[in-house]
Amino acid sequence: AELKKDDIIKKYRGKKAYINSVPTPFIHDLSYVLVSGNSIVDGQKMTAEILEFTKVSPLYPDIAENLRLASEDTAIFFKRLFLLEGIPLAIGKSWLPSNLLPDFTKEKMINNSLSTTLRQKYNIIPAKVEDYLEVVRPTNQESILLKSNNNTPLLLVKGISYLRDGTPLEYSNTLWQGDNVRFHFTLNHTPHGFVMGP
């Protein structure tokens, strides 16, 4: 019954149970920033659909704290649905300080990509990103967007990117489908021990 509920097997009355074909999970390399717009990842088409794009104020305490803003300050908020070959894979939410990005919400992002838009329109390139990973349960709305059930765990990646002078640029929460995604990272040996990336 548990295997059937998780769609691992199919059962037919009066016949045997059959194993469902299991799709190969998407492998996301944590050494790189999440693909932000429409692109090709390992031969598969990744697209980003913008669900919300607005300015918000006042700010929730955790957003104000992570962006080092006052609660009465304004931040740019956008929410995206990431799809791999048209199948929902992740929900991304991002907040950025409005004072760093004048007129940001008045124009569309280039190819729905934050990194491309920051680089080409504002000449801004993050110097450092800190990520935190945890497992969470989905809300009803998240289950609907990801076309999953309420029992499917989500992998939450909380990220904060910084400019070279240490100023926070983006605070993000990305919810990945727990049964369709694997995270990969590479550690390299250095005189100071093992580190991620080169």
Image (cartoon, rainbow, N blue to C red):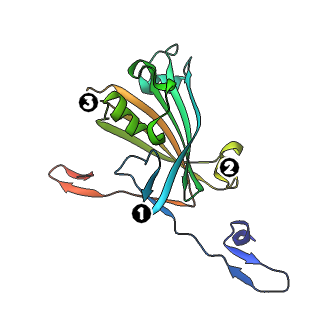
Looking at the rendered structure, the secondary structure element under dot 3 is loop
Find the residue positioned furthest to the bottom.
15
Q: Find disc 2 in the rendering and name its residue.
A: 143
User: Is 144 displayed left or right of 181 in the figure?
Assistant: right
Three-letter amino acid code at the position of disc 1: Asp
Q: Few, some or many C-alpha atoms within 10 Å of disc 3 (few <14, some 14-19, many ≥20)?
A: few
Q: CA distance from mark 2 to mark 3?
A: 37 Å
Q: Could you tell which of marks 3 and 1 lies nearer the N-terminus?
A: 1
Residue at 80% over, 86% down: 15
* Front residue (pair 135, 146): 146
Residue at 51% over, 43% down: 174
Q: Few, some or many C-alpha atoms within 10 Å of disc 2 (few <14, some 14-19, many ≥20)?
A: some
Three-letter amino acid code at the position of disc 2: Ser
Which percent across, then down, holds residue 170? 42, 31
Q: Find disc 1 in the rendering and name its residue.
A: 42
Find the residue positioned furthest to the left.
191
User: Is 91 displayed left or right of 2 in the figure?
Assistant: left
Which percent across, then down, holds residue 33? 38, 46
* Front residue (pair 3, 124): 124
Q: CA distance from mark 3 to mark 1?
A: 31 Å
